[in-house]
Amino acid sequence: MTQVVTRIAPSPTGYMHIGTARTALFNWLYARGRGGKFLLRIEDTDRARSTPEATEAILGGLEWLGLDYDGTAVSQFERAPRHIEVAQHLLASGKAYKCFATQDEIADFRQQAKVEGRSTLYQSPWRDITDPALHPDVPFVIRIKSPESGLTVIHDQVQGDVNIKNDQLDDMILLRSDGTPVYMLSVVVDDHDMGVTHVIRGDDHLNNAARQMMIYQAMEWPLPIYAHIPLIFGEDGKKLSKRHGATSVLDYALMGYPAAAMRNYLARLGWSHGDDEFFTDQDALNWFDLSGIGKSPARFDHKKLQNLSGQHIAVSDDAALLQEIQYFLTLSSEIDLHQKISTRLLPAMYCLKDRAKTFPELLEKAAFILRERPIEIEKKMEKNVNISSLDMLKTLTPQLQNVSWSRDALEALTGQVAETHGVNFGKLAGPLRAALAGQSVTPSVFDMMLILGRNEAIARLSDMQERGTP
Ligand code: GLU
């Protein structure tokens, strides 16, 4: 068996789209799950639209998603001499020809064909005029000789066999009159030279495949295996666009989704393995196959992503999670988590990661750890500060000095205090939360006490009593 080689070939003309990320993931999973190679080619031949920032966004997106590629990124533009060489080779071998037709002549041809009800695909008279003596000294393009009859069949792994009548394929231009290669030629030459065995890409390229196959056949190169995956739609069934929310991969990093959750979600977008929704990278690597890719467009569902994200956060290793949160904070450049803070967050991670769907949600729950005394109490928590609640804290606080600092002991003690005051524990939990955190989104009061430690917890309770009712 030859080694599987896949690639992602984005055009660096903007941000990195979710669809590009999904295509990259599929290619990465397919190759890595089979001990193959995953390559990156930047299709930067459109000089007017390609920017270094867009290339950076692609590299950043792949890095965030953890989709490592083999070797170095290939620049398509830099390979132009090789693309030209192939066109020249086709010319020399009679598989391509010089076409001297002017724009006007082509327009006239089309006009005439229309009037006569014939196909408007241009048929150049120069196809058969091979004698150089008959060639004028004017600019020319190089066209490939397309097959005049028969069928081109794309054996697509997702779409099935796609038949295209060869009389629908014109003699495509390979080199423009300024000598530059066309994109269609560059893709084929690059894929061939890079040893790409499987072309997995969006189905907006399906029509290109038939034209690209002409070049493979003319060069007598082995065809890659094609898999054209349906595009991604928004929840309303229309092609995913900014109207549906963020479409840039890095926006999802900035929203604080873990990369593992994003990989899991993107893998499910158009591919399935039974009813499995939540899975690890290893599962995906074991399971991913082209046969699991659906034929209809997948719908981007933010709720599903959030759901998976919460599950991934909940099962993450604490230290790894902290590291990813630190990366998130640098990326969003909101706060710099200093060493001191990270050592404070780590012991609390076990409860912070429970039910947080994103890193900002997790950090909101962590805010009580990072606050300095005396803690400010947010407006909506003030209802917990009244004569009777302060009275309960007054009973509780001295007893916290000697109680064993364990969940069981704290639960028993607070339960007792509530009972003495003739209320259920719920009535005490509110004031405790106000005193310990000053806000409503927190872990449980017991987790907070355990995390803060005896002295800090007592000090925060005392602060609230000293301050008195608002
Ligand atoms: N550059 C193309 C794109 O960004 C991909 C071409 C291909 O995968 O063959 O859509």
Image (cartoon, rainbow, N blue to C red):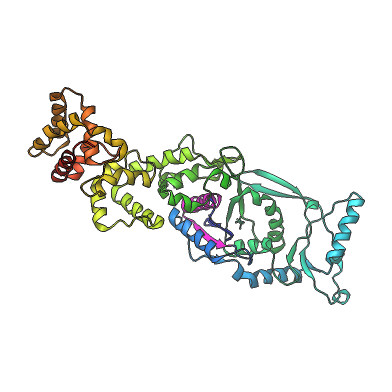
Furthest toward the left, the residue is 402
- Left or right placement of residue 2 versus residue 415 in this view: right
Indicate whether 237 appears above or below 425.
below
- Left or right placement of residue 310 versus residue 251 in this view: left
Q: Position of residue 17 (x, y in %)?
A: 54, 52
**Residue at x 72% of width, y 58% of height:** 214
- Left or right placement of residue 383 versus residue 250 in this view: left
Residue 466 picture quarter: top left
- Indicate the quadrant of ligand 1 in the picture: bottom right
Residue 294 picture quarter: top right
- The quarter of the image holding the C terminus is top left
In this rendering, does residue 278 appear at all?
no
Q: Position of residue 318 (x, y in %)?
A: 29, 48
Where are the magenta residues, as a range? 18-42
Does the segment drawn in magenta span residue 144? no
Q: Position of residue 63 (x, y in %)?
A: 44, 58
Does the segment drawn in magenta span residue 36? yes
Furthest toward the front, the residue is 470
Furthest toward the top, the residue is 422
**Residue at x 52% of width, y 42% of height:** 269
Indicate whether 179 appears above or below 282.
below
In this rendering, does residue 130 appear at all?
yes
Q: Position of residue 283 (x, y in %)?
A: 42, 44
Q: How many marks?
A: 0
- The foreground one among 82 and 356 is 356
| Magenta stretch: helix, strand or loop mostly | helix
- The foreground one among 29 and 41 is 41
Furthest toward the right, the residue is 116
- Left or right placement of residue 124 versus residue 240 in this view: right
